[in-house]
Image: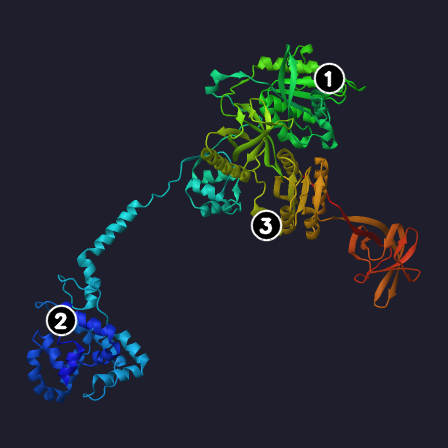
Amino acid sequence: MKGKKLKSSGGLDAPKDNKEFKRPRREITALQPKAVMPELQQPPDRISVAASLNGEDPEAGKADGDADLALVDDLSDEKSRIRREAVQPKQLPRTLKQKPGWEEEEEDTSDADKTAKTAKTKVKRSRKPLVDEDEDEDDLNGAADADQNSAVLNMSLARPPKPKAMQTPSGVKSSAPNKSRRSAPSRGGSNNHETASAASRKAASPPVAQRPEKITLEQAVTVQEFANILAVSETDIIKLLFSKGIAINITETLDFNNIKLVCQELGVELETVERKSGAEKTEVISEEDLDYLQHRPPVVTIMGHVDHGKTTLLDAIRETKVAQGEAGGITQHIGAYHVDVEHNGAMQQVVFLDTPGHEAFTAMRARGAKVTDIAVLVVAADDGVRPQTIEAISHAKAAGVPIVVAINKIDKEAANPERVKQELTEHGLVSEEWGGETIMVPVSAIKRENLDHLLEMLLLVSEVADLEANPDRLAKGTVIEANLDKTRGPVATLLVQNGTLRVGDIIVAGSVFGRVRAMIDDRGERVEVAGPSFAVEVLGLKEVPAAGDEFEVYENERDASALATQRTEAKRQSRIAQGRVSLSALSARVQEGELKELNLIIKADVQGSLEAIVNALKKLPQKEVQLKLLMAAPGEVTETDVDLAAASDAVLIGFNTALAAGARQAADQAGVDIREYNIIYNLLDDIQAAMEGLLEPELVEEHLGEVEVRAVFPVGRSKVAGCYVLSGKVIRNCKVRVHRKNELVFEGALDSLKRMKEDSKEVNTGFECGIGIDRFNDWIEGDIIEAYRMTTKRRTLSV
């Protein structure tokens, strides 16, 4: 019966060949788990086990085993020993798989005991009570089906075939599976391989950045960017500045003083690069153009103080009514116009740029001087030299362009051209009549007097300047104006300074690129070609460029896109450097109550107007109220702008622009305040008034009068002072100070005021009254009571 069980278990009857032995075991485990599991859990024959462990043939010892079995069973100690040796039937295949010459090594006692206890525990947990030895296989299957959970558990305990990757190499001796797994890697050289890989990774790792000895900066940088330049951590820079009493964060922009301080502490030499002047004239002629230069028309910029007649003069020359279209008679943005002039019997062209004259448009005047060939300085004969006149002179001199003075309004009774010449002499402009080199022409724009003489002088100066360009190359020039048109998209007025601009060209204007889809001249006509010195409106740019940006035509779109991306990043760095107050510092001051904010969203007709408004707003005092410009862009006011204003509690300003469909209704529903302006001065005045409205009102002490105590009357536990009003008046609940012999003995509020035993609101000079103060009863005749009250006063912005 025992031999039958050993055969069914597939243990000792299997041949010693490893492959043949493993196949039936895998089939039994996979296909017949319920019938096999009890058999695998049944202890094998102890004599067969002993024979197998001693290297003998199991079949040869079966006959003697039956006879000796009864004797062995009587010996309890022998029975326990055999049971401990046979408690791990799953390890028998491992023993049989070894070669005939295999010898077992000594194993650590503690590891062996632990393994035996673990295996014994598993067997006890999975062993089921066996029925009579004569029970057949069908009964076993029925018992297994009766308890499905037990079968699943037994299957989980069945040992699967050992993966080949985990088998002990034939050339390695091992006393236990754990030993073989631990020793195999060291024998096989895996540790050496890992060590070599680690060394290779360490050698391939990038070297640590070294701190530079010298750095060069053109603009301010953030803490994070500065740390990357110096190859130090941001924390080190923050700690260093904090030790000097400067609190910053990682995203804050460092000014040059802080950058210099950090460099000194770290021993790094700092070199700064000076920015070029904004009025420096653009050089657009390269060496390759010298052999192909041709004469080009002059670009003339009309400059001067506000209301001195610049636009009227240009209108007289062009014989159009441009001035009537300007709000308030003030030029809002640069206009570029072509004028045909007869000179020496031939028609020649002159390009005029009309720049605004009032203070807010300083940058536009500088831009006009930058691209001009001749500057016409308009000075009113009845007003003389004004602040913007002086500024225009400085811009023209900085750009290195010749100046022709047009003394306008000579038709007025108060005109005094000689006084104007005298004032101009003080600024380095001496008339030719007085021995100087500056051409000065008296004109009257309204009556069109001496206009031909002025044009003759302009063409004469252009001939002397020898203006040339190469029309056979790709175009280069400057953006004069730009705006966002609701139907045409981004529109830019470009002045071609060299080369020829054609429809279809790929251009880069500042940080914006695009393909020219159409060109329109100053007369509203479409043109296909624009040569040197001509200004045209261009359609097809991806975005609205900034007025004053240089543009250039490129042969392929890939190069244009790469350059535009590079300039966008440079523009971002410049915008960071120009930040007046960091966001973190601004937020801290707002939370502390030291600073209030006025959020603004500005939409203007063109980029130049927007630029002027932003520059003018920067000049407003912002010590206590900070202007926060959420968005400033050309174009009409849209519903998106209204949504942004509603979300940020901002004032929406539209300058010389229209409201898109639905914008007004959306603003009314959201409660957004939309302010529309045509004159920049009105806009600035309202913004300043709004900023002053955010200021906390100032408390001012207002003196009311003086009262003398002439008698003291006890009333219950308190006392009442009988008084006489010496000057002014005294009112109920006002503030009082009680003086006694030039000493202040009490300061507080007046609680009761009576006149002839009746409560009174106020008592004027020359009348008697009774005064009672709850917290003061120490009245003495002769005390002087000073009556006053605190009033609020509207504050104004302080520089």
Query: Can you tell which of label 1 and label 3 is closer to the viewer?
Result: 1
Which residue in the protein does label 2 denote?
Answer: 96
Element under label 2? Answer: helix
Q: Where does residue 294 sit, x and y in percent of width and height? A: 53, 16
Residue at the disc numbered 1: 443
Determine crowd level at label 2: few under 14, some 14-19, many 20+ residues with C-alpha closer than 10 A: many
Q: In the drawing, what numbered circle is on residue 767? A: none
- Quadrant of the drawing holding the C terminus: top right
Where's residue 777, x and y in %?
82, 62
Instruction: Mark 2 or mark 3: name the one nearer the start of the chain.
Output: 2
Identify the residue position indicated by label 3 in the image.
Answer: 588
> Would you say residue 438 is visible in this rendering?
no
Q: CA distance from mark 2 to mark 1?
A: 123 Å
- When asked about the image quadrant of residue 426, the answer is top right
Instruction: Give the secondary structure at mark 3.
Output: helix
Mark 2 residue type: Leu
Which quadrant would residue 482 be assigned to in this image? top right
Mark 2 vs mark 3, CA separation in Å: 81 Å
Q: Are marks 2 and 1 in contact (CB under 8 Å)?
A: no
Q: Say which of 794 and 507 sits in front.
A: 507
- Amino acid marked by disc 1: Val
Position of 134 relative to 362 (above/below): below
154 sits to left or right of 263: left
Q: Nearer the viewer, residue 274 or 401?
A: 401
Q: Residue at x 66, y 24 (%)?
A: 303
Foreground pick, 579 / 721:
579
The answer to which image quadrant residue 436 occupies is top right
Alpha carbon distance from label 1 to label 3: 58 Å
Position of residue 741 measured from the top left corner of the image (x, y, whole percent):
82, 51
Q: Tag 3 or tag 1, which sits nearer the N-term?
A: 1
- Is residue 617 placed above or below 376 in the rendered structure? below
Q: What is the quadrant of the N terminus in the image?
A: bottom left
